């Protein structure tokens, strides 16, 4: 059910894993890997801290190097004094920079 929500409203999912306890009861923990960094940023913007079963969702972004390079699907731009930065959460609050 959550997989369908994310693919319909956020973006393509590469992989999802859900944690279950004794008797197959959900622990309420899921690891979702999106196809691109833009989708990960969008899920943080739209879903972090919304209530599910009266508990807020906590979303953490874990950055890994993809086959085509880190943040290959995002636009690098100049942000003085750095020549190349990526706006990680698309809200101009956190930037990732590179010197080359």
Image: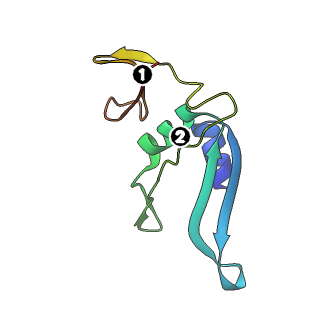
Graded by Cα atoms within 10 Å as few (under 14), some (14 to 19) or many (20 or more), the crowding at tag 1 reads: few
The x, y position of residue 72, in whole percent, is: 59, 25
Q: Quadrant of residue 78?
A: top left
**Residue in the image at 66% along x and 64% along y:** 18
Check residue 40 in the rendering and tell me which mark sits there, or answer none. Answer: 2
**Residue in the image at 68% along x and 54% along y:** 16
The x, y position of residue 9, in whole percent, is: 58, 38
Say which of 1 and 84 sits in front.
Answer: 84
Callout 1–callout 2 Cβ contact below 8 Å = no
**Mark with earlier residue (1, 2):** 2
**Residue in the image at 64% along x and 39% along y:** 8
The x, y position of residue 25, in whole percent, is: 65, 78
Q: Is residue 13 left or right of residue 77?
A: right
Tell me the residue that label 1 is attached to.
99
**Residue in the image at 57% along x and 38% along y:** 10
Query: Residue at the bottom extreme?
Result: 22
Q: Is residue 48 above or below residue 28?
A: above
Query: Residue at the left extreme?
Result: 80
Q: What kind of element bears circle 1?
A: loop
Q: Quadrant of residue 66?
A: top right
Which image quadrant: the N terminus? bottom right
Q: Quadrant of residue 12?
A: top right
Q: What kind of element bears circle 2?
A: helix
Q: Is residue 100 left or right of residue 29?
A: left
Calculate the distance from the C-alpha at mark 1 to the C-alpha at mark 2: 24 Å
Graded by Cα atoms within 10 Å as few (under 14), some (14 to 19) or many (20 or more), the crowding at tag 2 reads: many
């Amino acid at each position: 059910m959550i997989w369908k929500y994310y693919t319909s409203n956020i973006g393509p999912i590469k992989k999802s894993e859900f944690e279950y306890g004794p008797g197959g009861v959900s622990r309420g923990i899921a690891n979702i890997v999106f196809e691109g960094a833009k989708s990960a940023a969008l899920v943080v913007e739209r879903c972090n801290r919304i209530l599910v079963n009266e508990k807020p969702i906590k979303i953490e972004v874990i950055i890994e190097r993809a086959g085509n390079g880190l943040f290959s699907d995002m636009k690098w731009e100049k942000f003085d004094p750095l020549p190349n930065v990526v706006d990680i959460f698309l809200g101009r609050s956190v930037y990732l920079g590179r010197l080359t």
